[in-house]
Amino acid sequence: MSLLRVDDLHFRYPDGTAALTGVTFSLDHGDSLGLVGRNGAGKSTLLLHLNGILHGTGAVRVHDQPVEQWPAGELRATVGLVFEDPADQLFMPTVLDDVCFGPLNAGLSADEARRRALEVLHSVGAADLADRAPHHLSAGQMRRVALAGVLAMEPELLVIDEPVMALDPEGRESVIELLRDLPQAKIIATHDLELVLEVCNRVAILDGGRIQAQGPARDLLADDTLLRNHGLRVPASLRFV
Amino acid sequence: MLGHELLDEWSHLRSPLHRTDARVKLPCALVLVVAIVMVPVSSNWLLMPFAALIFALAVASGLPGRWILKRLLVIVPFLAISGLLVALLPQAEASAVHHAGGVGGRQLVRHALAVWLSVGGKCVLTLVAATLLTGTSSSADLVRAAQALRMPHTLTALTGLAMTYLGVLSDEVARMITASRSRGRVSGLRRRAGVLCSVVVTAIVRGFERAERVALAMVSRGYDGRIPDLTREPVPHAQIAGGVCFVICTCALYWAGVGL
Amino acid sequence: MSTRNPEGSQTTVAEQFERARELTVGGLAIALGVLVPIVFHAIGGGRAGSTFLPMYLPVLACGMLVSPGIAAAVGLITPALSSALTGMPPVLPVLPLMVVELAALGALASLLHRRLKLHVIPATAVALLGERVVMGIAVALAVGLLPADLLEALPPPMRQPLPYVIGATVTALPGLALQLVVVPVIVAAVERTSLLQGRGS
């Protein structure tokens, strides 16, 4: 039984723009999938389908059950979505309250939620930030806290949009280390192919609203012609091997 | 540039006022503001003891005096304009009275001055009181205080989001202004107005677009119609007692002053 | 997909998103309502406030995008929070009046555009007109109901509702024109880019 299975998913925005035109892929426990593709390829739109916020035609199944049939709260706790801009995701006045948000919505008591939030903050190396206002943090700290907010819901699948965008090299490295150490299955949508090489075992290339190629990360990301056809370039670390 | 100066800039200090829980400070500040606003023009002198009280609090707050004065600068144009209005209009009335053979023109002017002092004094004092409250509390503490006062959930949720995003949006606006300035100095009223409009419109549109993304993030983490109350420790009894004393003293000062 | 909320009724994802969106649009509108006047003062200088009504822009645009209750709450909180944080508008005599005006403005905009499905341009015009009427009623009520002691503290022009409203409206003509032009632009831009517009229908 696969953790996630997407079959022939189509989605059209209300203004008529076709964003997804037949996406098919699957993911197992322990998998780490890099979702790459040019701007406007449909990456972010696809991610919003995975926890039931957008609904297209076709099927998205989590644990072989269509997302439409999942109780919303359980689905959101199983598939954790981390957004591209952490500022969009840190909407509570303090870091601790933000990380408590998900667990409290899931029905945990205030004490349990607080305990879990502190544990998760500790695990992402942000325990000392608990009482700070999220928007006064550095970009790297905000990423960690945003990730903690989703990890506190104890998801089985982490869906992460552009995790290292706008980070300095040090912040980027520390986020990559953190992602690599997380045991959950992951889907990471990004333009940063080096990150994919370091964190993901598989890659899917999304272009024109559908998956154009998928396979082991090291094989696909070394294929210059394939990547160029979809607006991508072979990452430097593979270019000189 | 703007938002961080408005909130949380000095909330890290450790003065007695900072250490007082916002759940005590907020009701005290509200009582103080209402008492000041209710002072009748005929008892203008009563603003003096209130001013002394607020001055003492300002000293105890450890907030930089320059910062408080900078806040007050904003209302100077308002005070000047209302001063002009108050000075000019009754003089017209007074001269009318004088021409009609009546007396009391001088009294009318004196009364107008008293009105202006009352309005101006109240504006300054309430603004300093509000500045002391927001300067000595973090935005999270203020939201907590509003929740503890049982303000309606919609109001506290909206205020919390507004305060949380004030800094983010102001940074965005500051970047837009810098970008427009870096493309050369804009001269001429019309062009400056054009730049101003485009900055403001873009800021509002981007703000609302961000609001949608924030809503998506909320739903993704299980939001279902209610933002949970913020975590909080109980208020120490000594602080509650102190707050009650403050409220009683403020009310006593008011009643004594008005009764005299 | 649906879930049960604490009251026991079913909510769909679209409804959950809509509730969250109303709250976040409202919250950010309040923040914008504090910021935009600061920008106007910084670039436009001195009397930009009473002439261009910058605080009206986010409140009015927000009214077009959320339900009347949230829109009224936004109108209620914006001037109060701005007054506490920036000193503008001053607590006396402008703040109480602005709280009433902006709450009415937001609620009216929402009623006209969202409930009665009026196009955004006439909705803006009618909401601004209605807001001026509410301003007149509020001043008249203040004059009628305030105890003599406090009434004295009102500046002389405010003691006569009709001339006051006319004066304020003439001063604010550039601002009212600005709202008529800018609010529809903002609303159109937001409605066009709205990710989930019309979803669930």
Image (cartoon, rainbow, N blue to C red):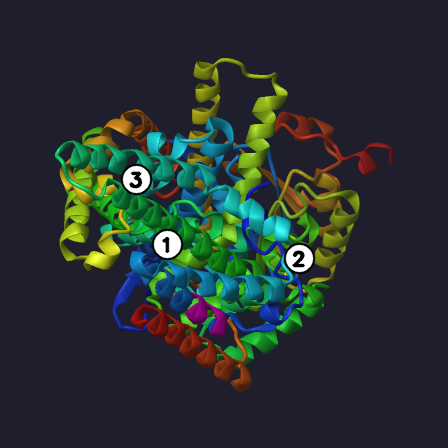
Helix, strand or loop at label 2? It is helix
* Magenta stretch, residue numbers: B24-29
Position in image of residue B112 (x %, y %): 30, 44
Q: Quadrant of the C terminus of chain A?
A: top right
Q: Quadrant of the N terminus of chain A?
A: bottom right
Chain assignment, label 2: A
What is the three-letter code of the residue carrying label 1?
Leu
What is the three-letter code of the residue carrying label 2?
Arg
- Find disc 3 in the rendering and name its residue: C60
Q: Residue furthest right?
A: A241
Q: Quadrant of residue B149?
A: bottom left
Residues C129 and A174: in front is C129
Say if the magenta span includes residue A197.
no
Say if the magenta span includes residue B25.
yes
| Res. A144 mark | 2
Same chain under badges 1 and 3? The reply is yes
Residues B14 and B71: in front is B71
Helix, strand or loop at label 3? It is helix
Q: Nearer the viewer, mark 1 or mark 2?
A: 1
Helix, strand or loop at label 1? It is helix
**Sequence order check, earlier mark of 1 and 3:** 1
Mark 1 and mark 2: span between their CA atoms?
Answer: 25 Å
| Res. A145 mark | none
What is the three-letter code of the residue carrying label 3?
Leu
- Report crowding for label 3: few under 14, some 14 to 19, many 20 or more residues within 10 A (C-alpha): many
Position in image of residue C30 (x %, y %): 40, 48
Left or right? Give the position of B57 relative to A178: left
Position in image of residue C16 (x %, y %): 35, 58
- Find disc 1 in the rendering and name its residue: C23
